[in-house]
Image (cartoon, rainbow, N blue to C red):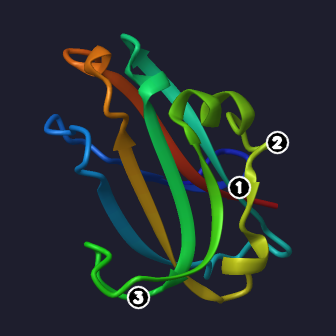
């Protein structure tokens, strides 16, 4: 998607209502920036939606590496970018300005594989709770 300021963004969604402790959800995506923005700044940031308390019990991990399978079967980690609570992600990296810089990894035609892992704590308090958060990778001039 392209914004009126020339920005481009990709939203990654993990939509699964069968999340439970001991069953992390992994998604992999190959990323290549081939846009036309000169010296593009590429950053990852999170946005938060409705939350009934589960966000404080969900850990998200973002890693860069290699691999082609969307289920991450062949993923090999080269760098961990972030690991923490989904609520903290949206507080600490909730906008482009304070996003996690990816420019050196996927700028100028470079390709890397991005892995997202979402995991719920083994805590009975998580039962029946929900959360919504978005991971956005955005390029701006």
Residue 77, image x, y percentages = 53, 80
Q: Earlier in the sequence, mark 2 or mark 1?
A: 1
The outermost residue toward the left is: 18
Residue 3 sits above or below residue 90 on the image: below
Q: Which residue is mark 3?
A: 67
Q: Earlier in the sequence, mark 2 or mark 3?
A: 3
For this rendering, which residue is in front, 75 or 11?
A: 75
Residue at 63% x, 67% y: name it. 80
Q: Is residue 2 left or right of residue 125?
A: right
Residue 83, image x, y percentages = 59, 50
Assign a secondary structure to mark 2: loop
Residue at 21% x, 39% y: name it. 19
Q: Quadrant of the C terminus?
A: bottom right
Mark closer to the observer (2, 3):
3
Q: Is residue 14 left or right of residue 78?
A: left
Q: Quadrant of residue 124?
A: top left
What's the distance in space between the residues labelled 3 and 1, CA to CA? 30 Å
For this rendering, which residue is in front, 44 or 108?
A: 44
Report the disc number at residue 66. Answer: none
For this rendering, which residue is in front, 78 or 122?
A: 122
Report the disc number at residue 6. Answer: 1
Residue 139 sits above or below residue 51 on the image: below
Whether residues under marks 3 and 1 lie with C-beta atoms below 8 angstroms apart, the answer is no
Assign a secondary structure to mark 1: loop
Q: Which residue is mark 2?
A: 97
């Amino acid at each position: 998607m392209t914004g009126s300021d020339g920005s481009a963004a990709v939203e990654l969604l993990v939509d699964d209502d069968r999340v439970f402790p001991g069953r992390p959800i992994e998604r992999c995506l190959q990323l290549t920036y081939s846009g036309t923005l000169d010296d593009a700044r590429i950053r990852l940031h999170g946005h938060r939606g409705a939350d009934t308390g589960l966000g404080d019990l969900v850990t998200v991990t973002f890693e860069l590496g290699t691999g082609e399978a969307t289920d991450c079967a062949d993923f090999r980690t080269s760098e961990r970018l972030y690991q923490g609570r989904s609520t903290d992600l949206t507080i600490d990296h909730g906008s482009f300005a304070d996003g996690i810089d990816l420019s050196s990894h996927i700028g100028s035609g470079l390709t890397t594989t991005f892995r997202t892992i979402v995991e719920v704590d083994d805590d009975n308090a998580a039962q029946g709770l929900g959360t919504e958060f978005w991971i956005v990778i955005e390029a701006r001039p």
